[in-house]
Image (cartoon, grey):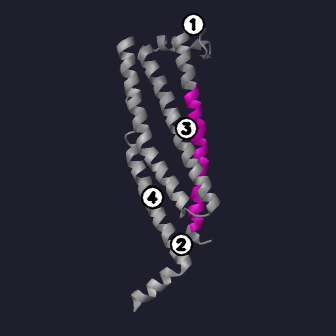
Amino acid sequence: MSKNLSAIQTISKVCNVLCKIVFVFSIVITVLSAIGIVSLAVGEDSVLKIGGVNIRGFVEQNAEISKNEMYAEMIKGVAMGLCYTVLSRIAGNYFSNELKAGTPFTNEGAKEMLRLGILTACLPVAVSIAYAIVCSILEKTMGEINAPDGFGFDSITAGVMLIIMSVIFRYGTELASKSSAGEISENTEKEQE
């Protein structure tokens, strides 16, 4: 294995582990945010109590956060958690498959990278739009929210970069197949003449 391919495999191993960590944290954020929403809605008989104080008590003690803003934050936590659970799972699958193949230059790997790029560009934006709609509905039904900003619009750049990488991987796959067929060496000899 060449030094460069060895470095790529090491990076893939690290990224695979990071994807698993992000996956677990995303699930935890989603679950805790969902419990928070239920706990806030239930009130005194709160599901989640920390140090004898439930979420509603926390909101009442903290003058800077209204109950409606807390709902918006919890909904954002669920939305972000679900979004990044999906993305980290797909990215983790890509890195696992890349490690099995031993190279990023496979047709399947290029397809997975393209899929990851499209989802990375689109999914956070779609979730952010859905979040804005939910906050708008909450504002109409519950009163002023001052909802936190959405998220996901910076993911478009990352998604486009992954899509470009998928094209590079596909081209690398073509070069590798031509190299194994001996076409590259013949073309190189013809160009030198």
Sooner in the amino-acid sequence: mark 4 or mark 3: 3
Characterize the local packing of mark 1: few (<14), some (14-19) or many (20 or more) Cα atoms within 10 angstroms: some
Q: x%, y% of residue 106?
A: 55, 63
Which of label 1 and label 3 is nearer to you? 3
Residue 77 is a magenta residue: no
User: Is 125 above or below relative to 177?
Assistant: above
Disc sitting over residue 165 in the figure: 4
Residue placed furthest toward the right: 100
Sooner in the amino-acid sequence: mark 4 or mark 1: 1
Circle 2 sits on which residue?
Answer: 177
Circle 1 sits on which residue?
Answer: 44
Q: x%, y% of residue 91?
A: 54, 48
Which of label 2 and label 4 is nearer to you? 2
Q: Residue at x 43, y 22 (%)?
A: 72
Residue 9 is a magenta residue: yes
Sooner in the amino-acid sequence: mark 1 or mark 2: 1
User: Is 172 above or below relative to 125?
Assistant: below
Characterize the local packing of mark 2: few (<14), some (14-19) or many (20 or more) Cα atoms within 10 angstroms: some
Looking at numbered disc 4 in the image, what kind of residue is underneath it? Met
